[in-house]
Image (cartoon, rainbow, N blue to C red):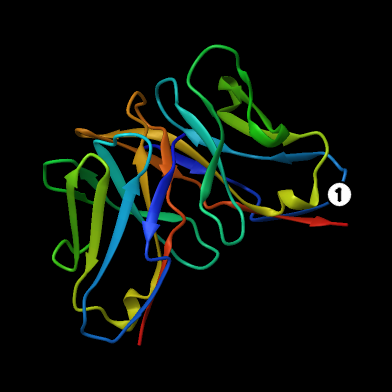
Amino acid sequence: GAVVSQHPSRVICKSGTSVKIECRSLDFQATTMFWYRQFPKKSLMLMATSNEGSKATYEQGVEKDKFLINHASLTLSTLTVTSAHPEDSSFYICSARWPSSYYEQYFGPGTRLTVT
Amino acid sequence: AQSVTQPDIHITVSEGASLELRCNYSYGATPYLFWYVQSPGQGLQLLLKYFSGDTLVQGIKGFEAEFKRSQSSFNLRKPSVHWSDAAEYFCAVGADAGNNRKLIWGLGTSLAVNP
């Protein structure tokens, strides 16, 4: 149980284009999902908290107009990187909070984004 | 504000040796504590968690951790390390931010295992 998938696992896009990353909880319903960014050899940086049916809560310093988050169902959240630039290249990871838990999260395998 | 410190950035142990990864937290109330492992090319996996009760918790893959309130610590241990344990290990504490509950992360400890 507690399986979270992400798609795609890798994506290369040209500067100025937009990229959508999907995060799905496969065997449980998640009212809350999270989007992280991980830099090489660095810890996880929380970008935003996604709540089903409502607007995402972004962490300080994260541009909400650049990183669009939609959590339209209890099993799907999407992150769209708009007008991507090379500095947006990174490893993006999503997680879903276990429904009966305050904090317990289960993670997707991550998406490697490269902007050329 | 809540914070998590993992004092060791990188640790190398020999296969079969014992392991202890340190984690210190800053939190006013009883913390919800977690250890996750990130193996190369894989997603983060929950190793174990502490919410309340017995301060020595058992996890997957033979790992255990002990919550010590007096030391604000939640160190991860394994009696005999296997080569497959080479990975990045993250300690995290649950935190409330308004209406949102999130995890505060340590910077991670990279574990290398010598044959």
Place of residue B31 in the rendered image (x, y in percent of width and height, measured from the top left) = 45, 25
Front residue (pair A26, A53): A26
Front residue (pair A104, B10): A104
Please indicate, yes or no, whether residue A24 appears anywhere in the rendered image.
yes
Q: Residue at coordinates 28% horizontally, 81% vertically from top-left?
A: A85
Q: In this picture, is B41 found above or below A3?
A: below
- The residue tagged 1 is B15
Chain for disc number 1: B
Q: In this picture, is A36 found above or below B77?
A: below
Place of residue A91 in the rendered image (x, y in percent of width and height, measured from the top left) = 42, 66
Which quadrant does the C terminus of chain B fall into?
bottom right
When asked about the image quadrant of residue B36, the answer is: top right
Q: Residues within 10 Å of mark 1 (few under 14, many from 20)?
A: some
Q: In this picture, is B47 found above or below B14?
A: above
Q: Residue at coordinates 22% horizontally, 46% vertically from top-left?
A: A50
What's the residue type where badge 1 is placed?
Answer: Glu
Q: Residue at coordinates 80% horizontally, 43% vertically from top-left?
A: B81
When asked about the image quadrant of residue A112, the answer is: bottom left
Place of residue A105 in the rendered image (x, y in percent of width and height, measured from the top left) = 41, 38
Name of the residue lying farthest toward the top: B53
As helix, strand or loop, the secondary structure at mark 1 comes to loop
On screen, residue B11 versus residue A84, left or right, reads right
Front residue (pair B77, A97): A97
Which quadrant does the N terminus of chain B fall into?
top left
Q: How many marks?
A: 1
Front residue (pair B93, A113): A113
Name of the residue lying farthest toward the front: A27
Please indicate, yes or no, whether residue A61 appears anywhere in the rendered image.
no
On screen, residue A113 versus residue B70, left or right, reads left
Place of residue A11 in the rendered image (x, y in percent of width and height, measured from the top left) = 38, 75
Q: Residue at coordinates 50% horizontally, 15% vertically from top-left?
A: B52
